[in-house]
Amino acid sequence: MSSSTGNGWAQLRQQTRTLESQTEGYFHKYSQFSQATTITPKPTDDEEQTEATIQDLLEKREALITQLSRLLDSESPLTTSALKSNNLTRHREILLDHRRELLRLKSSITDARQRANLLSNVRSDISAYRNSNPEDAEADYMLDERNRIDRSHSVADGVLSQAYAINESFGTQREALASVNRRIVGAASQVPGINSLIGRIGAKKRRDGIILGSFIAVCFLLVFFLM
């Protein structure tokens, strides 16, 4: 009796795990209906079939869990395994989670369909209004064009303002550098002997330049004649 009970328990658990895996696969498919870029105003045959399949899987799992519970209750308390009790509890928790997930997905799909239908109705009303009032439609178009032009002008004004600010900043920097240069020159002119010192330094540089140039010329001439 214990052996047959064990085999029955193992088979029922295997069936339960298989249906749990199938349910998760159909959940993935069902969730894509709410994520579609274009959702139909009414549920499609595929959507209704997927939902019905999930419901059927949940009912089958409920029946299997009931059988597992009865099988566990039929065992002697001395032979009842704590592992079996934990497994049964876990299957019940997963079933409850999946029922909640189905409700969540159905609500998500319903919300997405209602938003899509509302947007479609608004667009249809606007199109119908414009078709029945062509003058107002043309006025709205001209107003939209005017708003786009105004936005373009605002962007251009912003760019020009930044350019003017940068140019003004450069001008301020040039004036500051010129002022510093004038102060340096003025301070140098007030120091006794600074002008003559600067002149001697300049004369020395010119003399060194002449000597260096003459030396280079002589080297070229020597190279030329030696060749």
Image: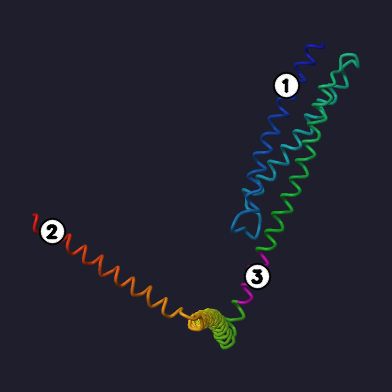
Contact between labelled residues 2 and 3, with CB atoms less than 8 Å apart = no
Q: Are marks 1 and 2 in contact (CB under 8 Å)?
A: no
Alpha carbon separation for disc pair 1 and 3? 53 Å
Mark 3 belongs to which amino acid?
Answer: Asn
Tag 3 residue? 121
Q: Nearer the viewer, mark 1 or mark 2?
A: 2
- Judge whether 174 appears above or below 79 on screen: below
Three-letter amino acid code at disc 1?
Gln
> Does the segment drawn in magenta span residue 3?
no
Q: Quadrant of residue 92?
A: top right
Quadrant of the image containing the N terminus: top right
* Residue on which the image places disc 1: 11
For the record, the magenta segment spans 117-126
Considering the numbered disc 1 on the image, is that residue within a helix, a strand or a loop?
helix
Classify residue 106 as left or right of residue 133: right
Q: Is residue 13 left or right of residue 150?
A: right
The amino acid on which the numbered mark 2 sits, given as a three-letter code, is Leu
Q: CA distance from mark 1 to mark 2?
A: 110 Å
Q: Are marks 1 and 3 in contact (CB under 8 Å)?
A: no
**Position in image of residue 29 (x %, y %):** 63, 45
- Disc 2 element: helix
Q: Is label 3 or label 2 in front?
A: 2
The residue that appears at 84% across and 26% down in the rendered structure is: 69
The residues tagged by marks 3 and 2 sit, at their Cα atoms, a distance apart of 99 Å
User: Does any portion of residue 34 appear in the rendered image?
Assistant: yes
Q: Is residue 31 above or below residue 75?
A: below
Q: Is residue 114 left or right of residue 198?
A: right
In depth, the one of 226 and 153 nearer the eye is 226
